[in-house]
Amino acid sequence: MRRFLHLHFDAPMMSFGGIRIDALPDAYPVPTASMVAGLIANAFGVLRAQTDLLQRLQDAIAVASGVVRHGTRVVDFQTADLGKPHMRGPMWTRSGPPFARAGQGVAEKRQLQWRPYVADADVHTVVWCVGDPPWTLEQMAERIAEPARPLFIGRANCPPVRPLCPGIVEAETAEAALRAAAGDRLRELHLPLDEAGMEPEDRLVSVHGRRLWDLNVHAGADPVVVRTVRAA
């Protein structure tokens, strides 16, 4: 019997991330490994600059998700004039030292960007260890219940509306853990190929769900099986 950390994402607005080219980001219907690693690390108070710790955590976990309700994809168009004095700094940060924009001239111009979200979705995710993470699953569950900092689902403007971690699930496989967590409401599974194998009606997709944290770039693609759950 294996042990899985159970996360439940059910909020009015969530953002599950994806690859980004210029100002045009993509979004996945379920959380990625890098998003889950970032959420867990945030619960422990890990800073973005602690890239070694973030990399160790991400590389030591695997994730699988089950969709109860897909929700609706929403794209928010944003425009910001970064040349205005109050946008250039210095600005206060939660880490203490003030922040000021610097670098290339693009950081001082008007920016157009699109931010994808999913509205009114209901997704269960299970996390298990495939390496040596900095914390045990039990420690992760405890810290998510009482985080060092406020948690959010993908972006800071997507706060959870209920506890994110119902607890630990024991099951033989990730699919069995998701079925135990979501019950007969489950409609679609997203499973790593090496965990689930392929069945005749499955779809195989490539997910850019991992990150090289020190370079802040995506770390290739992982094969993920998308499996429809037939209603009983």
Image: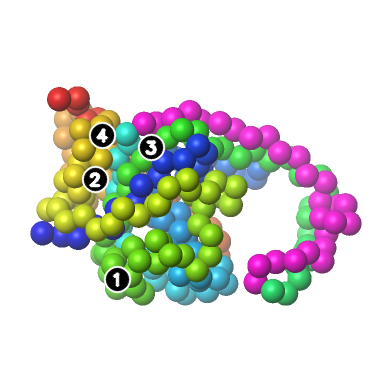
Q: Earlier in the sequence, mark 4 or mark 1?
A: 1
Q: Which mark is residue 122?
A: 3
Q: Are marks 1 and 3 in contact (CB under 8 Å)?
A: no
Labelled pair 4, 1 in contact (Cβ < 8 Å):
no
Q: Residue furthest right?
A: 85
> Any mark on residue 57, and which?
none
Q: Position of residue 57 (x, y in %)?
A: 39, 68
C-alpha gap between disc 2 and disc 4 = 9 Å
SS under mark 2? helix
Whether 36 is drawn above or below 96: the answer is above
Percent position of residue 106, x then y:
79, 52
Residues at discs 2 and 3 in contact (Cβ within 8 Å): no
Which is nearer the N-term, disc 3 or disc 4?
3
Label 3 is placed on what type of residue? Asp
For marks 2 and 4, the one nearer the N-term is 2
Instruction: Answer few, some or many: residues within 10 Å of disc 3's Cα (few below 14, many 20 plus, some between 14 and 19).
Output: many
Q: Which residue has dot 4 on it?
A: 186
Determine if residue 107 is in view: yes
Which stretch appears magenta?
69-95
Q: Which residue is mark 2?
A: 181
Tell me, for residue 136, which label it has, or none: 1
Q: CA distance from mark 1 to mark 3?
A: 26 Å
Which amino acid type corresponds to the residue marked 4 in the rendered image? Leu
- Disc 4 to disc 1, how far (Cα)? 27 Å
**Element assignment for label 4:** loop
Q: Position of residue 154 (x, y in %)?
A: 51, 49
- Closer to the chain start, of discs 1 and 3, is 3
Amino acid at the residue labelled 2? Ala
Q: Residues within 10 Å of mark 4 (few under 14, many from 20)?
A: many
